[in-house]
Image: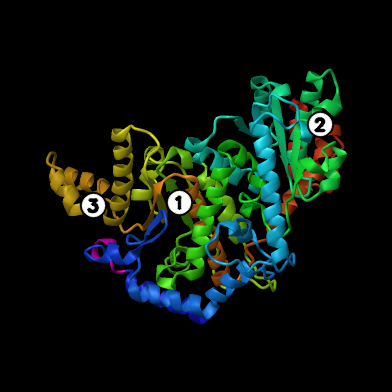
Amino acid sequence: MQDAQLESLAREAARVAPRHLRDLLSDENRYARWSHRAGPVLLDLSKQKLDEPALDALGAIAQACGWEARRDAMFAGAVLNASEQRPVLHTALRAIESRLPSPAPQAVRDEIDATLARMAALVDALERDAAGDYGIPAGITDIVNLGIGGSDLGPRLAVEALAASHTGRFRLHFLPNVDGHETAALMRRIDPKRTLVLLVSKSFTTQETLLNGRVLREWIANAYGGDDAAAAGHFVAVSANVAAAAKLGIPPERVLPMWDFVGGRYSVWSAVGLVLALAIGMPNFRAFLRGAALMDDHFRTASWRENLPLLAALVGVWNRNALGFPAHGVIPYHDGLAELPAFLQQLEMESLGKRVGADGAPVAQSTVPVVWGSVGTNAQHAFFQALHQGTDVVPLDLIGVVRPAHALKDNHDALLANLLAQGAAFALGKTFDAALAEATSGTDDERRALAAQRTFPGDRPSSTILLDALTPESLGALLALYEHKVLMQALLWDINAFDQWGVELGKTLAKAILPALVDGDVPAAFDASTRGLIQAIREKS
């Protein structure tokens, strides 16, 4: 944003600051004006600490930044990832389910459609236990997804969230981390001869994925008396590097593509979602794409005042840059969405955690807040004390599901009651006078001391997101909402949301440190702390 735009937000924040959310919520029409729907997703912003003039100021900034042009450029395949000179076309992955014509290049759409057809054929063959034409043995019961970052977080979230839609044909497992404890535990639980491993890595050079792949390859080969060729039949790859997959004995018909125009954290809609398709079946996978396409269509057609992704982005910018809040909490009131905070940590913090723009100059304002959270109601008994009465304000997304996939009505009613109660408590709080009136015993000083401890300042903003039910369609729409929110915030902050140079330095250093841990030859170029820690580890190894 430009200095003048930041100054306009500062003026609006100074004007709004004296108004408590109790005052804003005294308007009986506020919910009607500040809640909006797109298909199965309801977004309620009525508990955010801003009013219509402040929203108008935010909208004017978005208009001046050309939000519609940036949106349309992404859908058409413009090069938005400037540092790597790549288009950004994750929306094309679900364009086949859109009601609107796709402006993405026809060649891209043809390749995506062909890949969907290949996925469908492979899933069908595995479901029927008839994948011999792919060189995959019969009797597969367990699927292990080897991938990290975007090759794990999105698929894992979707597989867990959509448990009610599982076909039950396979057991699904995820091994993202290089830590061998989970790998060893998994190998004790499943049968190597009935296991199919999905190696998901765009470059086929990801250390964690390839190391776990080698471990599982050896484990499966041992089950065949050391026959590595037999073990190779238990592997499918999702990668842009077909040649590297071939070196591991994975033939082209068992390699599904990844593309440079889709970033990892936006890739669950692609063949990276193969594990999801195996979990819920291809018809439900297409429904997942359809939900995302519904949000795409809404994003492309809704006016700015009713556009859920843009409004979510503007509120986030307001909380970060006008009100100065450095963190953002995500609290899903549904155990199936327990992985959503981790997914959004990558989507938002890897996309927006930048301090310079595309020209290399420092940005003019703070960028992404720290995104964190946990599932409700568990979170209420862990860290909500600090959120209600601590010294820092943390805006929240409170996410609920109206219709559960079970018949335990009392449980679900209690869950939703807690969600609504927390939103109200954060906004309204409890005044000192109200707390004092409740303190009926003790001296006046004791009553006042207790009342101070039982006072809730309130005025703590939150958004409420309600899904009609947790289905493939609604989950797809929810994730697409957050994706487009990121695009809009990147525009306002003038940063590239589609690269991630910040992950590279640590990987480079790890490659240099690994030999020192193994052979003890510690280069003097390492800093004194790192040298000391290497020595401490080797002494106890």
Q: Is residue 34 left or right of residue 8?
A: left
Above or below — where is 239 with respect to 142?
A: below
Q: Earlier in the sequence, mark 2 or mark 1?
A: 2
Q: Nearer the observer, disc 2 or disc 1?
A: 2
Q: Nearer the viewer, residue 381 or 47?
A: 47
For disc 3, the neighbor class at 10 Å (few under 14, some 14 to 19, many from 20) is some
Q: Please, what is the three-letter code of the amino acid marked with disc 3? A: Lys
For disc 2, the neighbor class at 10 Å (few under 14, some 14 to 19, many from 20) is many
Q: Where residue 180 sits: x, y (%)?
A: 70, 29
Above or below — where is 121 with respect to 65?
A: above
The part of the image, by quadrant, that contains residue 120 is: top right
Residue 500 visible, this angle: yes
- Locate the N terminus and report the quarter of the image it occupies: bottom right
Q: Which secondary structure, mark 1?
A: strand
Tag 1 residue: 329
Q: Earlier in the sequence, mark 2 or mark 3?
A: 2
Which residue is depicted at the point 28% across and 34% down?
A: 410
Q: Where residue 426 sits: x, y (%)?
A: 32, 53
The region drawn magenta spans 18-24
Q: Which secondary structure, mark 3?
A: loop
| Membership of 535 in magenta stretch | no
As measured in the structure, the alpha-carbon distance from the residue carrying label 1 to the one carrying label 3 is 22 Å
Q: Which secondary structure, mark 2?
A: helix
Above or below — where is 90 with respect to 247?
A: below
Tag 3 residue: 430
Tag 2 residue: 232
